[in-house]
Amino acid sequence: MFTPNLDKMARAGVILNSSYVQPHDVIHPSTPGYLPANFTTLPQKLKHLGYTTHMVGKMCGCSIIFQLELQLPYRTSFLYVFVNAIRKDSAECIFCRWHLGFCNWKYTPTYRGFDSFMGYYNGAEDYYTHVRGMVSALDEAVGNITSALRDRGFMNNALIVFTTDNGGAMYTTANNMPLRGAKWTLWEGGTRGAAFVYSDNLLQKTGYTNNEMIHAVDWFPTLLTLAGGKPDAGMDGVNQWPTLSSGTSSARSEFVYNIDDIDNNAAIRVGQYKLIEGSPGEYNDWTPLPPLTASDMFNASFPEHQLFDLNADPTEHHDIASDHPDVVSKLLDRLRFHKATMVPANNPPDDPASNPKNFGGNWSPGWC
């Protein structure tokens, strides 16, 4: 694929080689699910700081540009961002799809912190049938946007964050090699994402690959702090700006991949070690290119616990749980600690009131 603009920024910025994302599913359009109103989003926080916020897009890559008066970038964790630019009195965000529910208007973007929204609510559009062309178009758009920002002097104080929202779906057209697994799994191929940060002036150390541990939940407090805000106490994320800007050690030494009380699986990383409890998912091989065979996807069984040393074995070929029962015990203790504060899954069934036939053939809010 031809991506000269992204390649140039990645090489000139900081490539994030240990940037992790959630093995998430989405809120489906036929279910009355939504992000509860008691959760404050990043754009809502930015509004309190005097920003205007806008959301546009359907691209499925994620990055951000921030333009502020002093030192500032921004990027949200659970809203997957493509490109975003901010000044002290203006923020322009190009997000991916809105996956946080839309059965009621009050759960849609302009009620959750955005001044405007142009895009769609669902998880699929026709661009999925011509991925290569869309990746090139995405790269061209990034080039156009950064050129416009530079012409207007905004790149002098801007940060671009580019990140995926999940591992590649190797069961369709993606390739996660040499990592194992795919989107929706607990394997590294489903959770260790491609990412970089770039700035003309804000990064103190550039042109290298950063191997420090960063998780998607860290973007919220990191970018909010840089925008002049203060993260709420008890957030899962931590401020990683020193790591991003100057290459210091990560502010975290562990993270939870996921705890799923429906599929009864979980995973945690502490230092170099990763513990998987239960089945990692349905796509478990190291498949270089589609198409897959059934054995690649479903015909696999696993022990109750698997342990991997990701420093020595980043591709997860060697389960060392039987050799290190003490490490397994330590990580299980940490997993139990996090399970104690787990929020139960809320996956309501499909509701026929969502049927597009009720809204002129369109998926629409206004039925829950």
Image: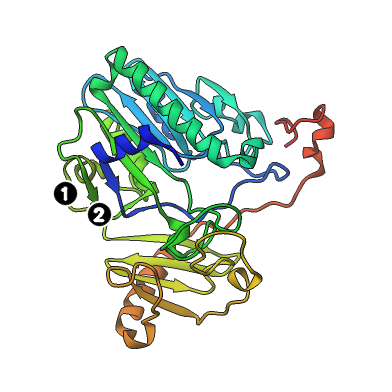
The Cα–Cα distance between marks 2 and 1, rounded to whole angstroms, is: 8 Å
Q: Residue at position x 29%, y 55% from top?
A: 213
**Quadrant that contains the C terminus:** top right
Q: Residue at position x 25%, y 31% from top?
A: 199
Is 69 drawn above or below residue 356 in the view shown? above
Is 94 drawn above or below residue 298 in the view shown? above
Q: How is the image coloured?
A: rainbow
Amino acid at pointer 1: Thr
| In-front residue for pair 203/30 | 203
Q: What residue sits right under mark 1 in the picture? A: 248
Label 1, secondary structure: give it: loop
Q: What residue sits right under mark 2 in the picture? A: 212
Q: Is residue 16 left or right of residue 364?
A: left
Q: Is residue 178 left or right of residue 130?
A: left
Q: Residue at position x 30%, y 39% from top?
A: 10
In the rendered image, residue 157, in percent from the top left (x then y), is placed at 24, 23
Amino acid at pointer 2: Glu
Is 278 drawn above or below residue 363 in the view shown? below
Q: Is residue 178 left or right of residue 16?
A: right
